[in-house]
Amino acid sequence: MSYRFIDVDPSIGPVGALISGVDLAGQLTEDIVGEIHSAWLKHRVLFFRDQKLNPAKQAAFASQFGELDVYPFVKAVDAHPNVIPIIKEPDAKMNFGGAWHTDTSYSLQPPKATLLQAIEVPDVGGDTLFADASLAYQELSDGMKQMLEGLTGVYSAKMVHGGKGAYTSVAGGGNIGDAYSEDKETAAVEVEHPLIRTHDETGAKSIYCNKFHTHRIKGWTREESLPIFDFLVKHLIQSRFVSRFKWQVDSLAMWDNRCVFHNPMNDYQGKRRHMHRVIVQGAIPI
Ligand code: OGA
Ligand code: MN
């Protein structure tokens, strides 16, 4: 595909492309947004450098791809209900989202897109890894694909945000940022989504379940389900499916939660990292 308005460089690795030649803070024509959207569907994660996006501009750019959503577990930035701070302070141990996952897959209509803007980043460390869950799906055996396709997952935030969830036990210490907002009721909800989802725009199938957001396979125990989740993530994070993004101040990444997993590295102890995040609502996974 050739692009008239943007430059698309996919050399970062198996998934993702660096987009240049566009100022996301400016007025974008429908044609430009259309090209960004096409590149996003093709490469699944887009990376931009040197974008001066305050919360209002970040939200305005994101809203061209759909309705913005509100994330339940972090208090938003002042006056911008759709923009949340993702902060790791120098003395914090845990980082937000520090495991392989897709965003908020435990909600009924998980976000199709996440847009993360870097405000302050360590010189070294704090990269984010992205894995192509669609390519990884394609490379499963036919037997495995057939078994997985018949299965439904029971998804819930309780493993991460519930009573003994990973965040709630440390949140008092401000470990994932003082903006953490406990919501036990939302955390307890269970929803059913397929383990393998079909992309509503491209039709591509992708691995979707993960052990932090998927409690179990429907009709199975959690103990029985975990080896399947563990296998799938082990398969997914092979280097032939993974790209690594090194952030700079004013970098923006926009990933497709329907077909990409991500994992932020927690390797910058003693340094501060500060991002702003916006999510765009997606459809009910099928
Ligand atoms: C997220 C997340 C990634 C990062 O914001 O959803 O997983 O690089 N963070 O901080
Ligand atoms: Mn995430």
Image (cartoon, rainbow, N blue to C red):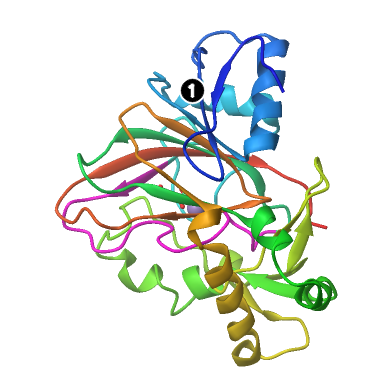
Whether residue 179 appears in magenta in the rendering, the answer is no
Q: Residues within 10 Å of mark 1 (few under 14, many from 20)?
A: some
Question: What residue sits 58% from the left and 56% below the top?
Answer: 102
The answer to whether residue 103 is left or right of residue 173 is right
Residue 151, visible in the rendered structure: yes
Name the secondary structure under disc 1.
Answer: helix
Q: Quadrant of residue 119?
A: top left
Find residue 53 and report its horizontal and vertical position in percent: 43, 21
Q: Quadrant of the N terminus?
A: top right
Q: Amino acid at mark 1?
A: Ala
Task: Tell which of 233 and 120 is nearer to you.
Answer: 233
Q: Which residue is mark 1?
A: 56
Residue 68, visible in the rendered structure: no
Whether residue 93 appears in magenta in the rendering, the answer is yes
Magenta range is 85-107
Compared with residue 20, is residue 46 higher up or lower down, i.e. above or below?
Answer: below
Question: What residue sits 27% from the left and 59% below the top?
Answer: 174
Q: Quadrant of residue 226?
A: bottom right
Task: Tell which of 147 and 74 is nearer to you.
Answer: 147
Compared with residue 123, is residue 20 higher up or lower down, i.e. above or below?
Answer: above
Task: Tell which of 60 and 42 is nearer to you.
Answer: 42
Find residue 219 and report its horizontal and vertical position in percent: 78, 87
The answer to whether residue 150 is left or right of residue 252 is right
* Total numbered labels placed on residues in the image: 1
Task: Tell which of 186 and 226 is nearer to you.
Answer: 226
The answer to whether residue 105 is left or right of residue 94 is right
Find residue 74 and report its horizontal and vertical position in percent: 45, 51
